[in-house]
Image (spheres, rainbow, N blue to C red):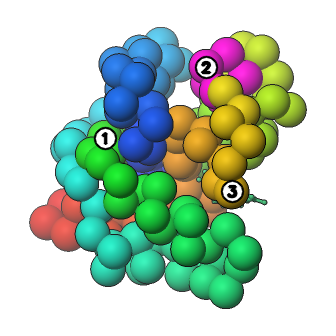
Amino acid sequence: TEKSLVLVKPDGYRRGLSGEVLRRIEAKGYVPVALAVVTPTHEQLAEHYAEHEGKPFYEPLIEFMSSGPVTAIVIQGERCIEGFRALAGATDPTAALPGTIRGDLGRDWGLKVQQNIVHGSDSPESAAREIGIWFPNL
Ligand code: ATP
């Protein structure tokens, strides 16, 4: 079955929402197969966000993501890549629908980066690449 890489970003970790995110993942029927709390390095983040290099929010995004610990989780389950993105909701926490992680818990801080609690892989290729970045021994 499919695997996806989920990050509880520094805003979510700081607010104590790692458990709530994990609860929703498990309630949906996805299985956590690896879990770690890590403070990301700039190198890890540059790899993780390579596709966004050069965009206006890139530098602030790297700063935000390296500002504290994140909870990295590899989840497994049938169509869990698409499924977790549905659980997460839209990128913009104000636009994200109620019922989603970002819609229920995300706040619009009016900053240069959307502090939107979670990341989830967007394709099987990204999932494989991202799992390699966060769990090189998996
Ligand atoms: P993620 O990949 O983190 O699950 P996403 O797929 O919804 O989120 P991406 O377009 O991949 O969003 O952007 C990655 C992250 O960069 C977003 O989650 C958000 O934190 C930030 N971001 C994206 N677009 C913007 C923007 N226009 N302004 C500010 N921050 C942004």
Q: Nearer the viewer, residue 43 or 26?
A: 43
Report the side of 43 relative to 64 (left or right): left
Image x and y of residue 111, in percent: 68, 48
Q: CA distance from mark 3 to mark 1?
A: 22 Å
Please state which amino acid type lies under the numbered disc 3.
Lys
Please state which amino acid type lies under the numbered disc 2.
Leu
Task: Nearest to the eye among marks 3 and 1: give it.
Answer: 3
Image x and y of residue 121, in percent: 55, 56
Which range of residues does the magenta coloring cover? Answer: 101-106
Which of the four quarters of the rendered structure image does ligand 1 lie in?
A: bottom right
Task: Nearest to the eye among marks 1 and 2: give it.
Answer: 2
Q: SS class of the residue under badge 1?
A: strand
Residue at 53% over, 36% down: 117
Identify the disc placed on residue 112.
3
Badge 2 crowding class, 10 Å Cα cut-off, few under 14, some 14 to 19, many 20 or more, is some
Mark 2 lies on residue:
105
